[in-house]
Structures are given as C-alpha cells and as structure tokens.
Image (spheres, rainbow, N blue to C red):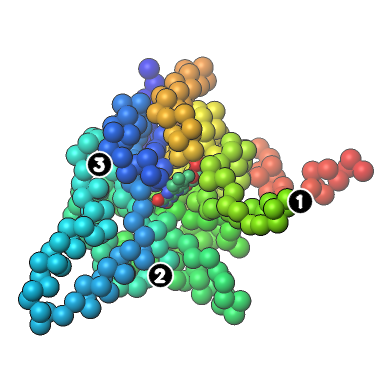
Amino acid sequence: MSDISVNYMGLKLSSPIMAASSGLTAQLDRVAEFEKAGVGAIVVKSLFEEQIVNEAEFLQSQSHDYPESADYLHHYLRQNSIERYLKLVTDVKNTVSVPVIASINCYSGGEWTSFAKEIEKAGADGLELNIYSLPLDIYKSSNDIETEYLNVVEKVSKQLKIPVAVKIASTFTNLPGFVNALKAHGAKGVVMFNRFYSPDIDIKKVRVFPADAFSSPEESLRELRWMGIVSALVSGIDLSASTGVHNGTLALKQILAGATTVQMCTALYKKGAVSISNAIDDINLFMDTQGFSSVEEFKGKLNYANIENPGKFERVQFMKTFGNRG
Ligand SMILES: Cc1cc2nc3c(=O)[nH]c(=O)nc-3n(C[C@H](O)[C@H](O)[C@H](O)COP(=O)(O)O)c2cc1C
C-alpha cells in the first residue's frame, strides 16, 4: 500500500481528498462517514461575515441599563449563529480525528475579523476564508478590490496560530500575481476555485432562474490550467483544487498539475462517501502502477515548469491551436 498522506499548510492529512465546505460538513453523521471513507480533512460549512456583523450590531444595540434584558440576551446568545457555529466546529472536531478546517465567507477586513480567534479557540485546525464580493461598482478598480481581500487575509492570519487558506474565484486579471500576494499577506493555502451560483434563463417562460448548484466534471479543466501555472510560479504555498473533482482520475490530474489536495462537494452530494474511498483506491492503483511511493513524488510533475513544452499551459486562444486547420 502506498503512502498517500500529504502535508497541507503544515497539517498532516492521511489522504489528499478533502470534504469541501457545504451543508454536508455541518452534519456529524456525514463527516463521520467521510472520515471512515478516508477523507484527509473536513472543511466545515461556512459562517458568513454578515452573520457575524449583524450579531455584533445587535448585541451593541442592547442597552446595559435594562438588566431584565439579560435573560433574553442570554437566550439569544445560546441560539445565535456565532455560538452555534463555534459549537459546530467543536462538535465536528470531537467527531473526527482528521484535521478540521473552519470556514468564513467574507469580503471585507472590518471589525468582524477579530472573531476569527474564537474559531481557533473552538478547536479548528485551520481556517478557510472564502473571499468574494460581486463587483457592482463600475468606478471601483480591481486593484481596490484585491487590496481589500489582502487586507482581510492579513488581519485574520496575523491573529491566528492555525494556518489560513483562501478560497478564491477564478476571475483575477493576474491570478499567479494575486496568489503570490495572498502568500505575502499570510495565506498558507489557496483553494482554486470557488464555484458560484449562476443565473440561467428559461426562454420558454422568459424568466431568470438559478442554474444547477452542482458542478460537472468538465469544469475541473478550468482549474487544471491554473493549478499547473500557479504551482510552478508561486512556491511556498499549498494549493487545493475545488470544482468538478468528482473522482480519483480528476483528483490525480490536479495533483500532477501541482495541487497538494483536492476538495469534493458535488460528488459527495450525488454519490456519498464512496466517492472518497473510490478516489483513494484510484490514487493507490495509480501509484502502484506508476511506481510512486509518495504523493510528493508526483505532485506537480506535469506543471508548467516541469513539462517539456510549457506552451501547452499557455495556449488560450483557438487561433494558436486550430490556426493551421483553416
Ligand atoms: C449545496 C452547496 C453548499 C455549499 N456551501 C458552501 C459553503 O458554505 N462555503 C463554501 O466555501 N463553499 C460552499 N459550497 C461550494 C463548495 O465547497 C465547492 O467549492 C463547489 O461546490 C465546487 O466543488 P464541486 O464541484 O466539488 O461541487 C457549497 C456548494 C454546494 C453545492
């Protein structure tokens, strides 16, 4: 049996397959199943910056002049989403022995960032910041937005001893440059990429409706290019692949391109924990067949720096590929 363990942001993972943040990782019976199937780490469902901010504002608005409100406040605090989230992190931690990574969906470096310490206290082994704000201000520059993101990462990671990963969108003008900046601001890992809900249009009913929340395997090709390029250009940061990684073959492709870990979400919703054990079997089989004894031996073997013709990662326009086909 090969050694499929990996070191992700200083955390020792028994396998490179992670359970991505979703409703499933808020359920203790499901995370226990994922561990049994061989998952390397669990990313807990996210808490949202808005939840933290709204609650802090609510608490501030409660006057200390009215002691009779103390009971209500006490009750509120027990019920509120922050306390519930911290309890969830502790419960997941008590349910599994693999590393548990908490997650916050956020977009600004405001006061809420001091809350991150509570996550560490709750027992999380790491924190994933899912950072994105839909840009709707046509007068704002992309540099302004990226600076805000970097500010969040710096503020949060400075306060924590546990490693911080940043889950990003794929749409940055200079993605390798941005990942390098994330590293400089304290990120130990980058998750490429988040998959957003998309609007779709029904032409029969002439209305907008939400597209499928689940990915298709083909979508993993988008991060394959960037995995290959970023892993070659930015050293000293761990990359995790997310979106479209539905099976072991797709996981192996991401690792060969430079990912330290891959995250599964849609596969877990559609097929359950068996997706994890099947992927692990496929990784073991691949390593036995190819003669690799550790994941490190083949991680990034086919990245932009290591292949003979790096142009294969650079080719973006059809002209270059099909130009000679008339
Ligand atoms: C139902 C559902 C809930 C999700 N919840 C979260 C979440 O709370 N936080 C987060 O960072 N990503 C969340 N995601 C995104 C997934 O973690 C993952 O990045 C995305 O689904 C792409 O991976 P996949 O192709 O394996 O599904 C969610 C996805 C789905 C489908």
- Which is in the foreground here, disc 3 or disc 2? 3
- The residue to which callout 1 is attached is 317
- Element marked by disc 3: helix
Residue 108 marker: 2
Q: CA distance from mark 1 to mark 3?
A: 45 Å
Q: CA distance from mark 3 to mark 2?
A: 27 Å
**Mark 1 and mark 2 residues within 8 Å of each other at the beta carbon:** no
Residue in view at x 54 percent, y 53 percent: 197
- The residue to which callout 3 is attached is 92
* Residue 301 position by quadrant: top right
Q: Is mark 1 within 8 Å of ligand 1?
A: no
In-front residue for pair 110/163: 110
| Viewport quadrant of the C terminus | top right
Dot 1 or dot 3, earlier in sequence: 3
* Side of 105 relative to 244 (left or right): left
Query: Where is residue 22 drawn, in percent x and y?
Result: 40, 45
| Viewport quadrant of the N terminus | top left
Residue in view at x 23 percent, y 53 percent: 84
The three-letter amino acid code for the residue at tag 3 is Val
Query: Where is residue 93 drawn, in percent x and y?
Result: 22, 42
Q: CA distance from mark 1 to mark 2?
A: 35 Å
